[in-house]
Image (spheres, rainbow, N blue to C red):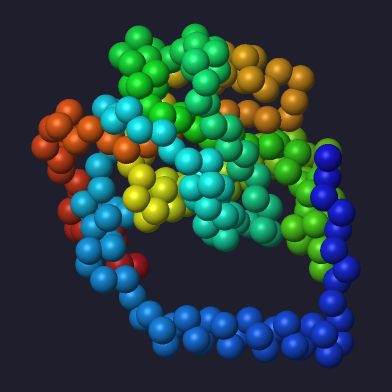
């Protein structure tokens, strides 16, 4: 069900909202100019992809908080096409296991939760709520290829935001692509406009299963100044 479009502010009300937005970002920049190195290590530089897990549940309130942080991240036209499905019950895990490569089944089954990061190819139907000041639906309506590309790109961004948010709140993650999107879509999204992107195990990791961190490309190989 589409959300009801909010009333679009105009005139003095719009100027007030803009001034408040300007003040908020200035205040934030004055409060914290950058993350300290320990925080950067936690969310990216020192973080690892995990595949073994402690038998410790993840509270639903924490998952909701992760989504709230994720939803704040930027997407094209504030389109927010990602949809997150938390696979927790034994029954749901058995359904998901049908789609996984054999080596990934144990990783998923032992995780407290596995998130199906999906996207809605008809995300544009929510634009009157998400982007109320201008009707951008004609950019996508009747244009399935453009809608799919936009949904996939921005849904992938949101999936990355989700992983960083989870790490920032003290959880560990292990993204997986070793599965059949076709089987996941048939099992969970049949008859809908949703498509799966990737999976992400989520919980409190057993770090004793880790091996050494693999190398990354150096700046001069991956980057250029033009």
Q: Residue at x 65, y 45 (%)?
A: 81
Residue 194 sits in quarter: top right
Relative placement, left or right, of 88 versus 8 is: left
Q: Which is nearer the eye, 218 or 160?
A: 160
Q: Quadrant of the C terminus?
A: bottom left
Above or below 14: residue 144: above
**Residue 26 percent location from the top left of the image:** 51, 87
Residue 14 seen in the figure: yes
Q: Residue at x 53, y 81 (%)?
A: 25
Residue 57 sits in quarter: top left
Relative placement, left or right, of 218 versus 200 is: left
**Residue 173 percent location from the top left of the image:** 36, 39
Q: Which is nearer the eye, 94 or 174?
A: 94
**Residue 151 percent location from the top left of the image:** 64, 42
Relative placement, left or right, of 171 versus 158 is: left
Above or below 120: residue 23: below
Q: Quadrant of the N terminus?
A: top right
Q: Residue at x 35, y 21 (%)?
A: 110
Above or below 127: residue 118: above
Q: Residue at x 57, y 83 (%)?
A: 24
**Residue 111 percent location from the top left of the image:** 38, 27
């Amino acid at each position: 069900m589409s959300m009801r479009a909010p009333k679009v502010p105009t005139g003095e009300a719009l100027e007030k909202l803009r001034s408040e937005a300007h003040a908020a970002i200035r205040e934030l920049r004055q409060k914290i100019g950058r993350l300290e190195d320990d925080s950067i290590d936690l969310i990216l530089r020192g973080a690892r992809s995990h595949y073994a897990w402690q038998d410790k549940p993840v509270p639903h309130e924490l998952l909701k908080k992760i989504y709230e942080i994720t939803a704040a991240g930027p997407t094209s036209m504030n389109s927010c096409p990602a949809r997150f499905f938390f696979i927790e019950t034994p029954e749901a895990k058995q359904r998901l296991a049908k789609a996984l490569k054999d080596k990934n089944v144990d990783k998923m089954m032992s995780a407290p939760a596995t998130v199906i990061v999906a996207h809605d190819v008809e995300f544009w139907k929510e634009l009157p709520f998400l982007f109320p000041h201008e009707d951008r639906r004609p950019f996508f309506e009747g244009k399935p290829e453009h809608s799919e590309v936009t949904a996939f790109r921005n849904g992938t961004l949101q999936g990355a935001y989700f992983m960083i948010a989870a790490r920032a709140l003290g959880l560990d993650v292990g993204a997986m692509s070793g599965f059949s999107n076709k089987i996941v879509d048939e099992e969970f999204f049949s008859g809908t406009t949703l498509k799966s992107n990737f999976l992400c195990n989520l919980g409190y990791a057993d770090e004793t299963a880790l091996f050494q961190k693999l190398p990354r490309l150096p700046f001069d190989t991956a980057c250029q100044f033009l």
